[in-house]
Amino acid sequence: NTWTILTANCTKPNNMSNASGEWIFCMMAGKVAAEATGTDDWDLFAEAGDDVGTGNFTVNGKGMNWYGEISTAATAPFGDVDNDSGFADNTNEITDISVNYISNGDYDQQVKSDAIWTGSSETADYDATGACSSGQEFSLMAYISDTFGSAVQVDTTGVSIDNTGTITDEDGDDATTNTLWLRIALVFSNDSYSGNIVYIIADN
């Protein structure tokens, strides 16, 4: 449970012998406390009691911002790749990339790539069109499974591969079949290149 009492921000009256006083009870909502916008809202009720009696307070109509969290420990080693190859089923393909999504509302799964990948002596330029018509250009396609016919062209800002995510539990939803396809240009220097392929969770 990720609901948290923020003890350092909670206060009580200086004189506990008085008949009344101000209490501040501060807490942080959990990661999957449901997003509330528009006509949806949260209502809060608090009650305090002692050996004399009780007192309570109600707050109505509060919103809850969208929250999203993503994690993956996966790497995507394509290994040896032939010049002028890729963007075909079972060609330069990596599958079973696992990503965990946690959200308190609807979310969109996205992917992006670094604009430049680096090798020990060369660099490669990302082509968001997928054509790879110039030397040292490479490109990626991605999808939530290994269905090549549904793959989408990856860019450097974030492209959706599945926008149907809904509120999760606190353990999140595991997407374990994410797949990538790589394409490289006809003219491409032999080197070992590396760069970041970033999986994104976005409000939907």
Image (cartoon, rainbow, N blue to C red):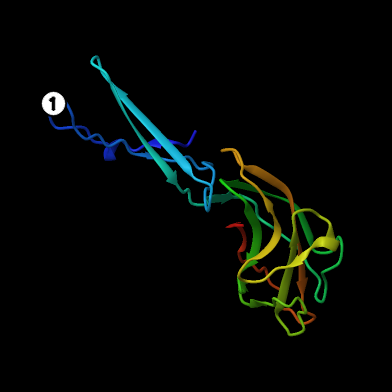
In the rendered image, the vertical position of residue 76 relative to residue 12, given as above or below: below
Q: Nearer the viewer, residue 190 or 171?
A: 171
Query: In percent of the image, x 60 and y 70: which residue is there?
Result: 157
57 to the left or right of 136:
left
In x, y percent, where is residue 43?
45, 39
Q: Nearer the viewer, residue 53 or 200?
A: 53
Q: How many marks?
A: 1
In the figure, residue 25 lies in which quadrant?
top left
Residue lying furthest top in this view? 51
In x, y percent, where is residue 193?
65, 69
In x, y percent, where is residue 129?
73, 78
Dot 1 falls on a residue whose secondary structure is loop
46 to the left or right of 130:
left
Q: Nearer the viewer, residue 69 or 43?
A: 43
In x, y percent, where is residue 66?
52, 52
In the rendered image, the vertical position of residue 180 relative to residue 1, given as above or below: below
Query: In percent of the image, x 82 and y 69: which residue is there?
Result: 87
Identify the residue position indicated by label 1 in the image: 18
34 to the left or right of 82:
left
In the rendered image, the vertical position of residue 72 relative to residue 4, given as above or below: below
Q: Residues within 10 Å of mark 1 (few under 14, many from 20)?
A: few
Q: Nearer the viewer, residue 35 or 37?
A: 37
Query: In percent of the image, x 78 and y 53: which residue is there?
Result: 145
Residue lying furthest bottom in this view? 134
Three-letter code for the amino acid on which mark 1 is drawn:
Asn
Could you tell me which quadrant the C terminus lies in?
A: bottom right
